[in-house]
Amino acid sequence: MTGPLPADFWDRIADRYAKRPIDDPDAYQAALERTRSHLRPQDDVLELGCGTGSTALLLAPEVGRYTASDLSPRMIEIGGEKAAAEGVGNLEFIAADLSNPQLSDRPRDAVLALNLLHLLEDLPEALSRVHAMLRPGGLFISKTVCPISGRVPIKLRLMLWALPVMQWLGKAPYVNFMSTDELETAITQAGFEIIETGNYPASPPSRYVVARRL
């Protein structure tokens, strides 16, 4: 038995995902404010793996042009409906994966990948594509779930134990658990200079990285 294609999985959970509250509002706001501090009013921004567009709707009014992309058409449909309801005019939603030429039709000032990189099977290839999407000096801003060091809560240990079975049944996505060092090494090897890091939340850590294209 095999699981569904990735887009099928995210399409299937999109409506539940849209209604789910943020797990850690304080950590989310902290990362959001750090991201805002790196964006300028004239910037052309691309967000990868935007989900149903919650972050895109908050950041788009503060930049010149914002493109929100996700491989799930249903996620994009929900995001577009929310943008229309809120009247955000400079925000475009595109159903596309990283290989879609629509995402590399022009150089961007910033590319965002928030809670995405650990879901990609070929991280070096993905980072190479992100590098090509940016203008020289442009920013790549990411937040990535990384493994926990030290004592792990029993609930999380059970989830990690069950993950392979859930993936085989098509009820969980691929997950690449990288250490923060492995993540940051991959980013620098792709042609970026890391200029800021942080953990939002601290435990389990979601590593926030701001990197400049060299």
Image (spheres, rainbow, N blue to C red):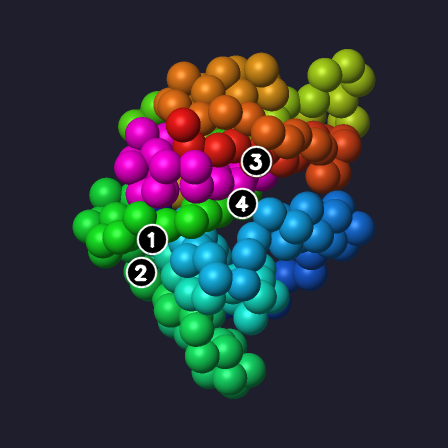
Q: Which residue is mark 2?
A: 95
Bounds of the magenta span? 126-143
Q: Residues within 10 Å of mark 3 (few under 14, many from 20)?
A: many
Q: Which residue is mark 4?
A: 114
Q: Which mark is residue 210?
A: 3
For image coordinates 65% across by 30% down, the residue present is 197
User: Residue 50: x, y in percent?
Assistant: 47, 55
Disc with the residue nearer the chain's start (3 vs 4): 4
Q: Nearer the viewer, residue 65 or 144?
A: 65
Q: Residues within 10 Å of mark 1 (few under 14, many from 20)?
A: many
Q: Which residue is mark 1?
A: 71
Q: CA distance from mark 2 to mark 1?
A: 5 Å
Q: On screen, 29 above or below 193?
A: below
Q: Amino acid at mark 3?
A: Val
Secondary structure found at label 3: strand
Label 2 with label 1: CB-CB less than 8 Å:
yes
